[in-house]
Image: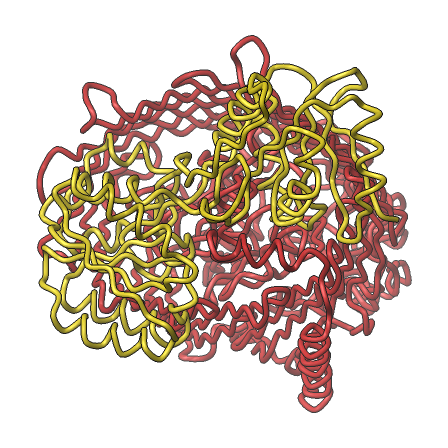
Amino acid sequence: MGLGMVSAAFASLSSVAVIYPEIREPYRSIFLDIIRGIKNELKTPIKSYALEKNYSIEMLKEKLEKEEINVIIALGGRGLLIARELQSLFRVVVGAVLVAPDGTELTGLSLAPDPQIFFQRVKEFTPDVQRITVIYSQEHNGWLIKRAEQTIRQYELELNALPAKSLREAASLYRDVLNKLKSGTDAIWLLQDKTLDEQTILPLILQEAWERNLVVFSSNLSHLKRGVLFALYPDNENMGRSLAELALKQMQNSENIPLGIKPLHNLLVAFNIRTAEHLGLKLTSQMKREFGLIFPLQ
Amino acid sequence: MFPHNMFFLIRIVFCLFILHTVDALALSPGMDEEEALLGLYGDKEMISIATGNSKPIAKAPAVATVITAEDIKEIGATDLDEVLETVPGLHVARNPRGYNPIYTFRGIFSQFNSQVLVLINGIPITNLFFGDRNQVWGGMPVQAIARIEVIRGPGSAIYGADAFAGVINIITKTKEDIKGTEVGARAGSFDTWDTWTLHGGAWSGFDIAVMLEYGDTDGQQETIDADAQTFLDSRFGTDVSLAPGPVNLQRENFDARLDIARGHWRLRAGLQRRRNVGTGAGVAEALDPKGRFASDRWNADLTYYNPEFFNENWNVKAQLSYLDTSQEVEEDVRLFPRGADFGGIPEPDFPVGVIGNPEVFERHIRFNMSAFYTGFKQHQIRAGVGMHYGDLYDVKEVKNFTLDSRGLPRPLGSLRDVTGDLSQAFLRERDRKNYYLFLQDVWRFSNDWELTAGVRYDHFSDFGNTINPRLALVWLTRYNLTTKLLYGRAFRAPSFAELFNINNPVALGNPNLDPENLETLELSLDYHPTNELHLTLSLFHYWWNDIIQFIPHPKTNINTAQNAGKQTGFGAELEAGWKLTPNFHLLSNYAFQQSTDEQTDENAGNAPHHQIYLRGNWEFLPHWHLSPQFNWVIDRARASGDNRIEIDDYSIFDLTLRRRAIKEHWEVAFSVRNLFDVDAREPSPVGTLVTPIPHDLPLAGRSFFGELRLHF
């Protein structure tokens, strides 16, 4: 038990190792897609290790040392724990995990989509929108909102960011704010956040938005099915490529100084045509071709 | 039977409840990782789509069901028919001949089932002879299937002839669906063996998919206790019937498919080879354990698809396709067994049996081109033209009998090759040309309203012209509710057997036939009350006119094909998909239909009035899937003139256990079908004077299958 090792690469000496959690499908495919991206970018054989839940860090360390690993790309929550344990011994890049850039001495990519990409897409799909309202938990998404505030001005948009401490507070904020938003010029941004209850608040937002022609977009892919206009989701293979680039940078980084955590730029658009029709938006074929997913599925 | 079935239903519901309860207790390693990913991707279905494991489904222009390769695995299906039985409003009945499937949509039942259009990759596989999928069907394996799209109701405005009661489009796998190589094998009851190899990869800039499947089975051997010869024995004082005896359902299948794509072009080719195909319950409904059929179906198509032909507003598709299909005899087919006698002479008329070996060969060439224009603000226009040339180019027959004016066989003296002898052959060689054009406009007249109006004109060289319109009004009622009102008219082209049968006083062709037609009105609601629950409801009413029937001439008593029948029907279908927990989902549907034969004002019969289907999928441990399935077929009336007691309802319970990702690449599954060994039967045809197989057609009892897959 302990280390469930799977060598996805050829048996040759290589200096890059990818560590990812042993997990069931379809979750596992996410990691396999990321690894494919890493391999395609590095174009050299790499070692990959699928970690079971009760892995032994000692055994892993031994393996990595024996294989003369130079840089580790650690994926997922288990990868993050490993990264923290091993960053004094190896160069480490973390990925495929929700991690805030503050308070961490690591190098890597967070799974949280970069707000900047959202604003860019809002401008593209709904040029009339002027203000974006977001209700968020300071504790979980404070850093993301800070980044949003820094970048939103370049898109001539206004951010109406409202912190909420609890579900109850968020619910009452949503009730207040939904009444005040204006059709056509206001948009709502749904974050992956503990202040959004899927069973009660989400249907309320979607129904109100439908009736009052408000634009809603989200960083949760399944909200697309429920009726938000668009969602952004990770482009796994390209995320792998970006992680590989970071790994190369880390290898050249003689001091092994952490390069920090960045929000995710490798994102695909999932778009709900039904909602777009309801809002009276016209999409070009060019736009449709760029979408990673179109709903209703076709 | 009702309490018996009720007992099963309670048992199933209880089983599913237990699964659900236990699931809440099951702890899954990796839950922390999963939770983080769920926050971003939402649910497993979305992850599966986002990582390309499952494909977005086609947006169908009607009330449709899409079954994916993943669903097929869940069902534990080994053949297409097992998959189709799970579709609401569709029931698979059986023809005695080869047990060929009768796909019965919404109460529209006929022995040759030419009212249903089956397509492979959008190309019809309809044969000219009987308007069906070939008399030697022999089943269809499922490993090469990426998805099946089933449209209930008419689709002639788009698909043309025979898109009548329903359309079944089988889409085969491409490179993306296979991703690498898969090798698999299955073994089970009835001495059944199946093996397959799939490969999808890139080569010199081409995307390539190769699929090979081979299967061999003795088939189920349930007993037919009385057949047509049993009746003849009682009439003519003989004792030669092989009933009681088993049905003859052995077969050997080989399927090969190739898919090559590059840029805008795709080339596909395939072979469906059937050998050693048993006669089912007998060609003349008299058991024939030795008769063997064979069939080869070759197909190829070249497709050009460009979503930006002139500019981004033009989407153009052109397709050229070829199909060659045969019905052949491998071992003499006995219509009646050795020693059959029809009272002519003191000795048996047919000491070696009544032998008839009809063979038919066809080729089909199709070309179609369609363009989709999206440059207008409120309108999307789709227009197309096409042609179909179908040639029944060879008819062969070896037989030892001729039919007298009453339709009874008389000896020809010996086994004679009557090929080309127009006084003896059963059919003339013929061809058919069909030219068509269609136009469709999708008019978005307000943000939430869309009206689709389409019409297709068809010209046929043998029976003339037909025009079929379609209207669909779609209303985005709420953020989670869509309402559709649909109207469609469809036609079914008369088959060559109906038009050109000769020398057969039981069923003589009539070149003056018109196509059958069908008008359907539907109301459909699609509702997503929560993320976990999806409901659809369809209400329909149809009018089926000019039904082709073989009617006896009042003076000669010879049956000739005529547009004589009329049937109307109405009903409802309710579907529900429910994710009870992240690891357990439940799929269910209920279908109801009531159809009336307007000539007699009685129930049209044969099709179930109610159908209930339930399937659960429970991942009780990581990579371990358990899928129970329950199908309840309820209340099938006899057709007018059939005085037999009503056929029993049946409920069948199947179970599939699957373990994925063993040592990364391996997968095993075990299935049991008809777990409680229920005696399930499909209605046998009623005769005018006598019903040859009075006690209906028995389906397979309990059976077991184990399978192993390697994916690398």
**How far across and down, in percent of the image, does residue B136 sit?**
67, 40
Q: Nearer the viewer, residue B264 or A76?
A: A76
- Please give the name of the residue rendered at 52% of the width and 38% of the height, measured from the top-left corner: B171
Q: From this viewpoint, which residue is outermost toward the bottom?
A: B3
Which sits in the foreground, B177 or A106? A106
Please say whether residue B418 is visible from this viewpoint.
Answer: no
Q: Residue at x 70, y 38 (%)?
A: A86
Image quadrant in which you'd find residue A3: top right
Instruction: Tell me if residue B689 comes above or below residue A172 in the rendering.
Output: above
Residue A37: x %, y % from top left: 55, 27
Where, quadrant-wise, is the N terminus of chain B in this rendering? bottom right
Quadrant (top left, top right, bottom left, bottom right) of the C terminus of chain B: top right
Left/right of residue B691 with respect to residue A166 in the rendered view = right
In the displayed structure, does residue B8 sit left or right of residue A174? right
Number of numbered markers: 0
Q: Residue furthest top?
A: B204
Q: Position of residue B123 (x, y in %)?
A: 46, 34
Residue B350, x across and y down, in percent: 84, 46
The hue in which chain A appears in the rendered picture of the protein: yellow
Find residue A68 and report its image quarter: top right
In this rendered view, identify the residue nearer to me: A37 or A55: A55
* Res A110 seen here: yes
Q: Is residue B208 left or right of residue B355?
A: left
Chain B's shade in the image? red
Quarter assignment of residue A265? top left
Protein image colouring = by chain
